[in-house]
Image (cartoon, coloured by chain):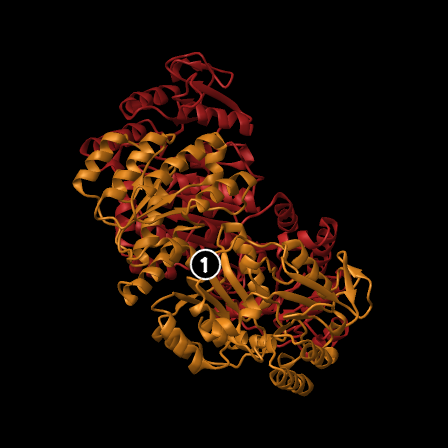
Chain colours: A orange, B red
Amino acid sequence: MPDILKELEPVFYPKSIAVIGASADESKNGSQFLGALLQAGYRSSLYGVGRGGGTSHGLPLYPDLRSVPGPVEYVIISVPREAVLEVIDDCAAKGVKAVQLFTAGFRESGTEIGRRLEAELVAKARQAGIRVIGPNCIGVYNPSMRISYGPLARVSAPGHIGFISQSGGHGGRLIEHGLDRGVDLSKLVSFGNGADLDSADFLEYFGADPETKIIGAYLEGLGRPRRFLALAREISPHKPIVIWKGGRTDVGAEAAASHTGALRSSYAVWQGAMRQASVIPAESIEDLADMFVALESIGPAPVRSVAVISGIGGGGGGESVLGSDAFAGAGFQVPRFSDATRRAIEVLLPAVGTILRNPLDLGGVTPRPAALESVIKLVFADERIDMVVVQEHFQRLLRNLTPARVREMNSVMISAWRAQSKPLAVVAPAWATTEASMEVERALREAGVAVFRSFDAAARSFARASAYLARRGPA
Amino acid sequence: MPDILKELEPVFYPKSIAVIGASADESKNGSQFLGALLQAGYRSSLYGVGRGGGTSHGLPLYPDLRSVPGPVEYVIISVPREAVLEVIDDCAAKGVKAVQLFTAGFRESGTEIGRRLEAELVAKARQAGIRVIGPNCIGVYNPSMRISYGPLARVSAPGHIGFISQSGGHGGRLIEHGLDRGVDLSKLVSFGNGADLDSADFLEYFGADPETKIIGAYLEGLGRPRRFLALAREISPHKPIVIWKGGRTDVGAEAAASHTGALRSSYAVWQGAMRQASVIPAESIEDLADMFVALESIGPAPVRSVAVISGIGGGGGGESVLGSDAFAGAGFQVPRFSDATRRAIEVLLPAVGTILRNPLDLGGVTPRPAALESVIKLVFADERIDMVVVQEHFQRLLRNLTPARVREMNSVMISAWRAQSKPLAVVAPAWATTEASMEVERALREAGVAVFRSFDAAARSFARASAYLARRGPA
């Protein structure tokens, strides 16, 4: 096992956890961490610690860490900053391996006392051989261990995306966004001020972690830029790395300094360094998730040419123009079909109200699953086409057809796709979703189909994924 | 009344409508147009015409237009293209003022017969003094007349946005998107091939229409570029014009030619011409709606500086960085608050876990409506600030608070906003919405608050709206 995996095993796979700062008042942050771990179903030993005693979420609270009966490997700290150093002494006495601190008011506060406290905290922990995550962070999320993220009890199935977040809030939003759209993480860690363990350590960890195939990050700055970039260069030929940089404007960088004490750097310099390390850029939570979906779907070779199919359920003319603009604008070919493909499609579909070329407008005909299946098979079989993009307005279809018919249509699309190896993306615009429309979407995601909210999001994501694969070369 | 209003009165305010091509089979396009008009509640005389006779949606069907008992001002045609010329003869005999043709297979088909038929159709109609909308279009939507759009029966309250669409599908999606997010249209017209009435005619109409304050369009090309641009230059100082151009890439332009027979033009040339006419560019349905929301909310003066407020319900640090990057990146100032504002806020909010500057992170505290109201009033009152942007994760708030508490919070925000005159925008990220979250959103929209799905969408829309106002100068 690589050193870093062994070193951080107590962080991601702790055999026991104590939450310090829990209380009978279940609205307190410490109590919420404890309650979420219980609700998520963390399976090993879990202890609550709170000066006031009593119980929290049905668990007895110990007055301090030393009173906890069994060994404790990992500690979540949510106490006022004045109490933190004493808690670290307790952790040392107890033989704790690692701590995470929700407690804030350290370096990021911009005050002298905050800076001093952070330095003392780290010195004390290092002396006792305790690794520190934070302070000023939400900490670790690990679905395979049923370790929930802060107060958020929802935990997805274990996935293959490892995520490093310098913002606790963005980490939580990525988890929730992923739950909504079937983007599952292997692990996530929010590290706040990164006083001890920082983004470079976690990058190294995810580079070695066999559960992680794709690495993502939200970063506001780098504590050790050389180390981070050297690791990124080493890892990215094997695992794609996607990074959203917060604080790219002066005002944003100032906000980042208040947020996590991140040092300011020029965004142009950042971009250049990341490009050299083959890091894929992203711009928001949704954009990160779009990139993960594209990277999980794209297969081993870059996509150079796409077929755009619209008009399922009607109204596809304008959409075919939009789809073409989005993919051509992102650098893809939207080539003519081969003569054989075109002729075969002409047999299947009427000539009026349709556009029987690429982009293909299926026209105002109510979708017939058999015809749809044949058309999609033909398009996948055309050797000029690397990937198929289908637009589907789930809500409109559900208004005009029975849910069973919509399911049937997607089933034939999925089976046509599975019979071969090129990627399929579905574009499903929506401002307001319904339970029924989300069920249609979930079924596609569970089958492994890439789903986006716009042609533009699909095109930009597959363009970046393809550029990454082209640069990396055959795996 | 300007000539154009009089000329197109039978188009937008018809005293009687006949739908030709209806049938007892209610799944046919003609029957769907008829059914939607009935369901929408069109209040004047409505007739169904279908060779087969019988009834459709409970209305008796006349075998031809000449058999309809009363006068008919406007006719919706959905018959095979071979029957179109005969129908125009009937319209002439009946004294019809205007027709719209859903029928396709004309110029856009790229065939000689299609081109010839379209020319004959227009010649015949002109001879009889009949104006033509289409062919190959969905036609007119007018909420104030309860005239529904094609087969779509949903009609919003009458709004102030007039929309011209070269794509029937995009027109329908804009109406539905607007219904979802409270963006109401005065009128919309999809004109397909524009064989007679075209984008320039409708631009002139909306320029004169007292019900229309903002004009939007989806266009794939211009039939009469000089006329259109002259009108745009004349109208845009009084009413903002927002245009989404479809077919900006070569492939997209080819698709547009198949779609509506639009002529190809260089997108760079298009952009230059539109810029000179002070036309505001847009890039998608969502982007058009974002622009309409910004233009309806912005007030008379450009916005130059914004306050960004995040952290309602917690987790605002990363969001404050994101909001700053979005607005600073779009050219806005995100200035420091005045000393007086900052000191007053420091009295209201705790120092730890918050960021008490601009961008303002309200911190991990459960929102207290009274404190929120005071803070927002203080920020609006700061003379350095032109506009306030608040981020709210409706779904997360609804999970952590009672719906009544969320409503109360938004009510105090709305009342703080209404007590002064600067614009307020709410950013509400969502991949999947719920009925409860949409209710929160609707309440904000009904109060007149601008709602966006991302900081970036809000920033880019207000930046374009501000640039328009700055260029136009005081109204």
Instruction: Look at 41% across and 20% down and name the residue there.
Output: B22
Residue A307 appears at what percent x and percent y?
Answer: 29, 46
Location of the C terminus of chain B (image quadrant): bottom right
Q: Is residue B211 visible?
A: no
Q: Which residue lies at the image location 38% right of the left edge and 61% below the top edge?
A: B275
Where residue A407 sits in the image (x, y, percent)? 45, 35
| Between A300 and A360, the one nearer to me in the picture | A300
Decide: is A168 above or below B234: below
With respect to residue A236, does B233 lie above or below?
above
Residue A92 drawn above or below residue B240: below
Mark 1 crowd level (few <14, some 14–19, many ≥20, 10 Å Cα): some
Q: Residue B422 or A74: which is nearer the viewer?
A: A74
Amino acid marked by disc 1: His
Please state which of residues A137 and B184 is positioned toward the viewer in this rendering: A137
Q: Quadrant of residue A129?
A: bottom right
Residue A68 is situated, as x and y percent measured from the top left of the image, at: 74, 69
Image coords of residue B115 (percent x, y): 22, 34
| Residue that carries the numbered disc 1 in the rendered image | A160
In front: A305, or B225? A305
Q: Chain of mark 1?
A: A
Asked which quadrant contains residue A463, the reply is bottom left
Image-based side of A28 in relation to B114, left or right:
right
Residue drawn at (72%, 67%) of the image: B375
Q: Looking at the image, how many numbered discs can be counted on the residues?
A: 1
Q: Secondary structure at mark 1?
A: loop
Does residue A91 sit above or below B451 in this rendering?
A: below
Left or right of B225 in this view: A43: right
Asked whether residue A23 is in view, the answer is yes
Residue at the farthest left position: A339
